Amino acid sequence: MRKRKLSGGIGSREVSTPRLMTHLLESGPQEGVPVLFVHGNVASSRFFEEALTVLPPYYRGLAPDLRGFGRSEPKPVDATRGMRDLSDDLYELMKALGYRKVHLVGWSLGAG
């Protein structure tokens, strides 16, 4: 797992799950209330970079790149499953990070 620090206290790392390697931006305290930010089509986690920097200090901001976007693994999506590949990816990511419940913020494709 490779970690980097970006401006505004945002961290960047890759998280491996049984489904794929996901790039993740994160901010806030490890024990903070998790908020999952899901980007839209033709975008990446960087869409939420500013939001991650202004979260109140008791929240943990998590902004992954969906499969095939940003720096996540470019695995194909099975069109017969609709949005299920993406939601299954996010579910496995949250399990890998140890979260059972999160607040969800979605934009465009990410709101699906």
Image (tube, rainbow, N blue to C red):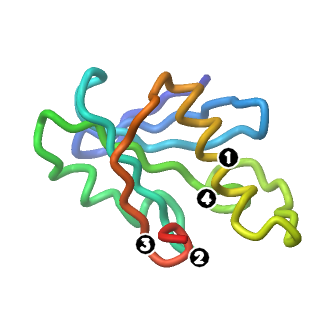
The residue tagged with tag 3: helix, strand or loop?
Answer: loop
Residue 41's label in the rendered image is 2
User: Which of these two is toward me, 43 or 96?
Assistant: 96
Query: Are the residues tagged 3 and 2 within 8 Å (C-beta)?
Result: no
- Gap between marks 3 and 1 measured at Cα: 17 Å
Q: Is residue 76 above or below residue 33?
A: below
Split into 4 quadrants, where in the image is the N terminus?
A: top right
Q: Earlier in the sequence, mark 2 or mark 4?
A: 2
On the image, the x and y values in percent for residue 72 come to 67, 49
The tag earlier along the polypeptide, 4 or 3, is 4
Q: Residue at x 60, y 76 (%)?
A: 42
Label 1: few (<14), some (14–19) or many (≥20) C-alpha neighbours in 10 Å: some
Residue 67: give its label.
Answer: none
Would you name the residue on which mark 4 appears? 70
Mark 2 is on which residue type?
Asn
Question: Circle 1 — which element?
Answer: helix
Q: What is the CA distance from the residue labelled 1 to the residue labelled 4? A: 15 Å
Which residue type does callout 4 highlight?
Answer: Gly
Query: Could you tell whether 3 is left or right of 74 in the image?
Result: left
Judge from the rendering whether residue 96 lies leftward or rightward of residue 33; answer left or right: right
Q: Which residue is mark 3?
A: 107
The C terminus, quarter of image: bottom right
Label whose residue precedes the other's in the sequence (3 or 2): 2
| Residue type of the residue flagged with mark 1 | Asp
Residue at the spot 43% in from the left edge and 72% down from the top edge: 107
Q: Is residue 30 above or below residue 7?
A: above
Task: Give the alpha-carbon distance from disc 2 to disc 4, as whole Å.
Answer: 11 Å
Of discs 4 and 3, which sits in the foreground? 3
Label number found at residue 89? 1
Amino acid type, residue under disc 3 in the picture: Trp
